[in-house]
Amino acid sequence: MKKSIFFLLLSLLIAPVAQAQAIYESFRSVKLDQTRELKIQLPRNYQRNEDKIYPVILVLDGDYLFEPVAGMVDYFSYWEDMPESIVVGINQRKTRLEDGRYDTAQYLPTGSGANFYEFIGQELMPYINETYRTAPLKIIVGHDYTSNFINYFMFKDNPIFQGYINLSPELAPTMIEKISNVLSKDPKNTWYYLATGANDSDQIKEDVIQLDARIDSLKLQNLNYHFDNFAESTHYTLVGKAIPKALEDFFQMYRPISKKIYRDVILPMEDESRFEYLTNIYKTTEELYGFKRKVRINDFIAISTAVEKTEDWEELEPLGDLAVKEYPDSMLGYYYLGIYYEQIGEPKKALRAYEKGFQKEEIAFLTKDYMLEKATKIKEDFGW
């Protein structure tokens, strides 16, 4: 009996550790005529959720950058601040200079650099897609020399990556111009993160700040762009701050609407539809992450609060219909429809909506007493 209890406790202790361990693979590349060492971290519930697909985060300089990225991805996804994701690292300790080689005329990958570029695009990423259950969203991460390299993937008409995490990039000559030209097209569903630090290399810091100024001057509407210049951080210590910041920025749409987004984006909207803003968030995340999510109660409340503050009542009808669809057993959708009908002068329809809502389950701030009060008030006002 004691032995069985001991082995049960031992298995419980070992299981979480096993979940956090990386898979180590040797990948034979025809393009490179070499074998490359990979580190792959699968989500904790990968084996259990057989039908689920996952975004992929490819990490260059995997010999030292994989663990901090994989650790933060595991941490963020554990708290549901980002979707569970597959993290893939390429070890480059002995090859990074050759892997990132570019010519001195066009400053584009050449020789071993061109081979490494093709290895990622034509061999490694297809292998990851075929071997694991991957979602459309792909992100690539690099530091200094390899950070410069990841930008070359943006120059294709249909880039295989939608997200670029640039950690103190050591930019090649003309790269600022090239990146600016690509981003000036204002691509949708593209995320670009850029970071330097106060104590970064002077030349790197100068170039990164110049690139940020160029991107900022473009006044882009669709590009999801974020820049950080960390105080008192060096070329190496900024990495520890930038990785969680980049993930937080990239997956902002995945989390509930924040007070800041409500205040700075949703409330000031004039020509845009707040309802469409909400549905576009969920449509975009479904396309990128590969699974459909129910609209959060928090997000319904954020949109409806802004609608009521600005008295843009027409938005409440589609919002109410969506809430009925998403939460058919709750009061939420019927409450929004009741408010809408009241405001457009349809008291009978409003009464029916509140009465239907009264029969449903309480949710958030809505109670049976409150719904009854709304219905009773209409009856009193019209003598019914």
Image (tube, rainbow, N blue to C red):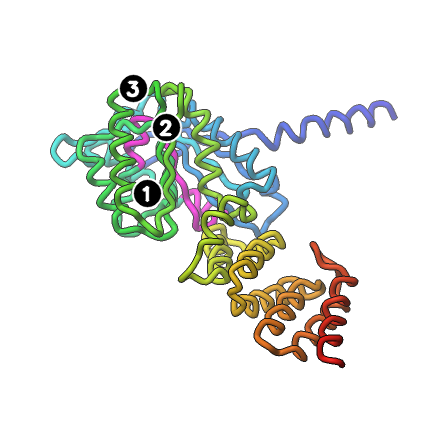
> Would you say the residues marked 1 and 3 are in contact, meaning their CB atoms lie under 8 Å apart?
no
Q: Is residue 121 above or below residue 277?
A: above
| Residue matched to label 3 | 201
* Residue type at the position of mark 1: Gly
Secondary element type, mark 1: helix
In the figure, residue 355 lies in which quadrant? bottom right
Of tags 2 and 3, the one toward the viewer is 2
User: How many residues crowd around disc 1 within 10 Å: few (fewer than 14), some, or many (20 or more)?
Assistant: some
| Residue matched to label 2 | 229
| Residue matched to label 1 | 121
Q: Residue 81, position in %: x, y?
A: 55, 41
> Would you say the residues marked 2 and 1 are in contact, meaning their CB atoms lie under 8 Å apart?
no
Residue 170 showing in the rendered view: yes
Q: Is residue 210 above or below residue 233?
A: below
| Magenta-highlighted residues | 127-150
Where, quadrant-wise, is the C terminus in this rendering?
bottom right
Q: Residue 365, position in %: x, y?
A: 70, 55
User: How many residues crowd around disc 2 within 10 Å: few (fewer than 14), some, or many (20 or more)?
Assistant: some
Tell me which residue sits at (40%, 22%) in the image. 231
Of tags 2 and 1, the one toward the viewer is 2
Q: How many marks?
A: 3
